[in-house]
Image (cartoon, helix red, strand yellow):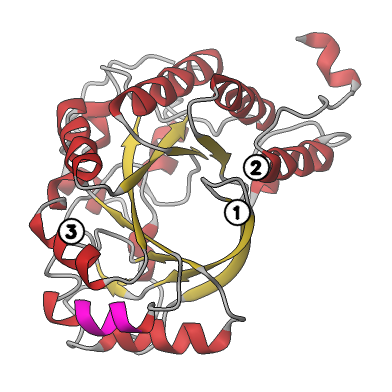
């Protein structure tokens, strides 16, 4: 694929290619689940994940589809805390909680600072609270929320890729220096961070995708993050579908995700996870796909490289 394009990717270009949003209820999260996660202390714990219904993120990243479950305007004060309380009442007791709000937790247009105290009180029994944010919103508000928590705070930041030709085209409005500065601020204030890494963003080949995902993991750990999550890029948000039609994007193969996870774990610099959500939609050999997905889940939980999957599709490599 050729990374050179003859059009500008900006907010307008991305917005005009979108479909409709899903109908959401501002009084409830649009989804929640519990999952097991290998923690920084080496334990496997039940983790609650709450997908908060919130206003759309002000950053219109090229690959993002989270806008589908957002509102156009800020929701009522108190609604976010209400959603968290509702979700916690639905799930079994958990000590780790992830609050994902389709944007940045510290964006005051998404979550008013006045809600921090009640949110913190709802999470008082948790050992660790994980939120997500664009690096631009990492500031004194982050410290204010940390101080209200009776829990460890972790912040997930989207690094996406260190590819110099691709990162600017993602419309994220972030530089590598911005990312490093945010991680440094968090680390200086005893807050752990994790990075989201994209596997095969647009404009690169399958082979390049593996190389640049591995380089991005290296960069993230050198910057000071404690954990990386590798996310295979998918279509479905309008913009990515158009790029696919123009042969500027195709989703990564499951075997590529395996390779990146293996190399990340072997670095032994921190936890590395593969995002296994809906992996069946990604390309892979029908005879071994399910075994590969199971292997990825196992490596996530063990943080060890397990025995590779044996299949005739490996012969062509």
Task: Using the rendered view, name the quadrant where residue 202 is placed.
Answer: top left
Lower sequence index among marks 2 and 1: 1
55, 178: nearer the viewer: 178
What's the magenta region? 116-121
Q: Are marks 2 and 1 in contact (CB under 8 Å)?
A: yes
Quadrant of the image for the C terminus?
A: top right
Q: Using the image, determine if residue 256 lies above or below residue 188.
A: above
Q: Using the image, determine if residue 297 lies above or below residue 30.
A: above
Instruction: Estimate the x, y position of residue 26 in percent, counting from the top left.
Output: 32, 85
Lower sequence index among marks 2 and 3: 3
Q: Secondary structure at mark 3?
A: helix
Instruction: Estimate the x, y position of residue 4 in percent, counting from the top left.
Output: 28, 15
Q: Secondary structure at mark 2?
A: helix
Q: Using the image, determine if residue 234 lies above or below residue 154.
A: above
Q: Which residue position holds label 3?
A: 142
Q: Are marks 2 and 3 in contact (CB under 8 Å)?
A: no
Gap between marks 2 and 1 measured at Cα: 8 Å
Image position of 122 (left or right of 113): right
Residue at (45% x, 78% y) in the render: 125
Instruction: Give the crowd class for mark 2: few <14, some 14-19, many >=20 residues within 10 Å.
Output: many
Lower sequence index among marks 1 and 3: 1
Report whether residue 19 is seen: no
Instruction: Estimate the x, y position of residue 68 in percent, counting from the top left.
Output: 37, 65
Using the image, tell me which numbered label, if any, was put on residue 37: 1
Residue lying at the far left of the rendered structure: 140
Please identify, in this view, whether the residue under mark 2 or under mark 3 is nearer the observer.
3
Q: Which residue position holds label 2?
A: 300
Instruction: Give the crowd class for mark 1: few <14, some 14-19, many >=20 residues within 10 Å.
Output: some
Instruction: Estimate the x, y position of residue 249 in percent, counting from the top left.
Output: 45, 29
């Amino acid at each position: 694929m050729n990374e050179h394009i003859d059009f500008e990717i900006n907010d307008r270009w991305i917005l005009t290619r979108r479909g409709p949003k899903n109908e959401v209820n501002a009084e409830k999260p649009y989804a929640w689940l519990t999952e097991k996660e290998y923690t920084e202390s080496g334990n496997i714990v039940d983790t609650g994940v709450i997908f908060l219904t919130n206003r759309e993120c002000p950053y219109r990243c090229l690959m993002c589809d989270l806008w589908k479950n957002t509102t156009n305007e800020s929701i009522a004060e108190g609604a976010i805390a209400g959603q968290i309380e509702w979700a916690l009442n639905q799930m079994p007791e958990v000590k780790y909680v992830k609050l994902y709000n389709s944007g940045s937790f510290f964006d005051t247009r998404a979550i008013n600072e006045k809600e921090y105290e009640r949110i913190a009180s709802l999470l008082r029994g948790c050992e660790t609270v994980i939120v997500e944010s664009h690096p631009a919103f990492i500031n004194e508000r982050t410290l204010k929320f940390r101080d209200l928590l009776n829990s460890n705070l972790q912040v997930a930041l989207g690094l996406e890729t260190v590819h110099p030709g691709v990162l600017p085209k993602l419309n994220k409005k972030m530089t590598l220096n911005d990312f490093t500065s945010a991680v440094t601020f968090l680390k200086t204030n005893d807050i752990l961070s994790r990075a989201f890494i994209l596997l095969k963003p647009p404009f690169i080949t399958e082979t390049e995708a593996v190389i640049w995902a591995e380089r991005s993991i290296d960069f993230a750990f050198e910057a000071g993050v404690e954990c990386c999550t590798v996310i295979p890029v998918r279509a479905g948000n309008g913009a990515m579908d158009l790029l696919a039609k123009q042969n500027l994007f195709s989703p990564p193969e499951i075997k590529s995700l395996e390779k990146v996870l293996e190399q990340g774990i072997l670095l032994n610099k921190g936890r590395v996870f593969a995002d296994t959500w809906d992996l069946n939609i990604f390309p892979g050999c029908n005879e071994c796909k399910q075994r590969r997905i199971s292997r990825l889940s196992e490596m996530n939980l063990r943080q060890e490289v397990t025995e590779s999957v044996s299949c005739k599709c490996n012969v062509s490599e």
